[in-house]
Amino acid sequence: MRWRRYGEHAALLDCASLAEMSAARATLAEAALDGVEEIVPGARTLLVVASAGALEAARSLLASADLDHPPAGDAREVVLDVRYSGEDLSLVAEDAGLSVDEVVALHTGAVYTVAFTGFAPGFGYLAGLPAQLRQPRLTSPRTRVPAGSVAIADEYSGVYPRESPGGWRLIGHTEATLFDPSAERPALFTPGLRVRFRSV
Amino acid sequence: MRALEIVSTGSLALVQDLGRPGYAHLGVPPSGALDVAALRLGNRLVGNAEDAAGIETVLGGLAVQAVVSCTAAVTGPPVAVSVDGRETGSHLPISLRPGQKLTIGRPATGLRCYLTVSGGVAVPPVLGSRSTDVLSGLGPSPLEAGARVPLGPVTGVPSGADVVVTAPVPSQLTVPVLLGPRDDWFTDPASALNTQWTVTAESNRVGVRLDGPPLRRVSNSELPSEGVLTGAIQVPPNGLPLVFLADHPTTGGYPVVAVVRRESLGALAQARPGTLVRFHASF
């Protein structure tokens, strides 16, 4: 772990792995330090926006924390019903050297964790994609991906919260609401949440 | 109902308050007025709380008609303001009677003028803010001619005889920055930043795009996505920096070489295309 300065009011924690980042995030979130304004996870980093005093407190907390045994945090798990009929499903199967049924079995068999967010409100990067399904983004992104599209790219799975352009490989569709700013929990996917997919 | 009618919008008129910070972990940009000091001043002039919503314009051109008696002010760069054709000036409280029309001219310097009105713009808040976020689409749509904008209840009295000293927005800026977090990805970043950059016309509320001699990378490795903040200077593979403003994405995949000090963000938000910018880095 290494802290890097990020302007006057923030610091970036560089982590060795997604697991270390997730443990640091859970530790900081659990501590709920006064003066911490934002904790923004990335793929290998944690961006902490806070007063100078709170940044110092976060540093010393993480220096002494047992990151091999982080707090459990939000214990919720959500299961999303998915129709596996995405436009790239056969492409994904072909590139993986698998049948479509095997792709669906792998994707539904895994337990995912929301590692970090970005791209659009409510878009979560879900870690835990089986190695056999790791494939690059499309070389030419789509200008229009429908809301609810379940997709994969690199080491992640994700769900498009609303219609947008996108370059991930589409494998299915869910009716779940991913983002509703008027809801008490505006985003379904929050960092640390566990997610599973069920074929319907 | 207390309201304001939009007569014309100029090139772009958006409702803005101080934004919706605190939701970056859900992928929600902070948004909010780009020249925060100008919005706060405008609100003080009309007797509002500083965080009330006003209207952010690009290159003026906004005209509004009062539906009820209210007090208005125009802040940002110095700009001509008239009521029913009579010049009133900017940066001072202006009383409007029902039916009177306030028009903002085109500022000679700078980019964004703010119209604040007693009671504040009272469109329904989204995640605690009335700001329009052009990146995520959260908040109200851009204002259109003919629209009626609701106003909140008056909460305070307009300021008295304060004289606000205004200055033209400079055509050359020296912007203090702090190096990091990814300055080690670049060759000699402090001097590479301390050169003459030009603000390009592709700049918007997401960020100020700059043209000049590209920054050189030490290596071509890929950066896993990481959190970004307003003021972060991100450098994509073409080496040309982009300074993120309030409607920036919450995570990004290109290295951030340095971060602009907060007190300089307002000046960058007022920088027109063609403005010359030099970054002065400290460690």
Image (cartoon, helix red, strand yellow):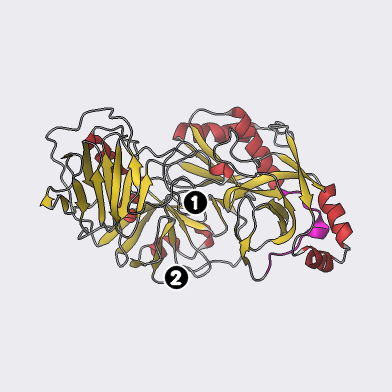
Magenta-colored segment: predominant secondary structure: loop
Q: Which mark is residue B214?
A: 2
| Residue B256, position as x, y percentages in the image | 50, 56
Q: Nearer the viewer, residue A162 or A28?
A: A162
In the image, taking residue B227 as reference, residue B57 lies left or right, namely left
| Residue B45, position as x, y percentages in the image | 21, 37
- The residue under the point 67% across, 41% down is A22
Q: Secondary structure at mark 2?
A: loop
Amino acid type at circle 2 is Pro
In the image, taking residue A39 as reference, residue B93 lies left or right, namely left
> Does the image show residue A58?
yes
Residue B66: image quadrant is: top left
Q: Nearer the viewer, residue B157 or A24?
A: B157
Residue position for label 1: B137
Label 2 vs label 1, nearer the camera: 1
Q: Which mark is residue B11?
A: none
Magenta-tinted stretch: A127-138
Q: Nearer the viewer, residue B228 or B92?
A: B92
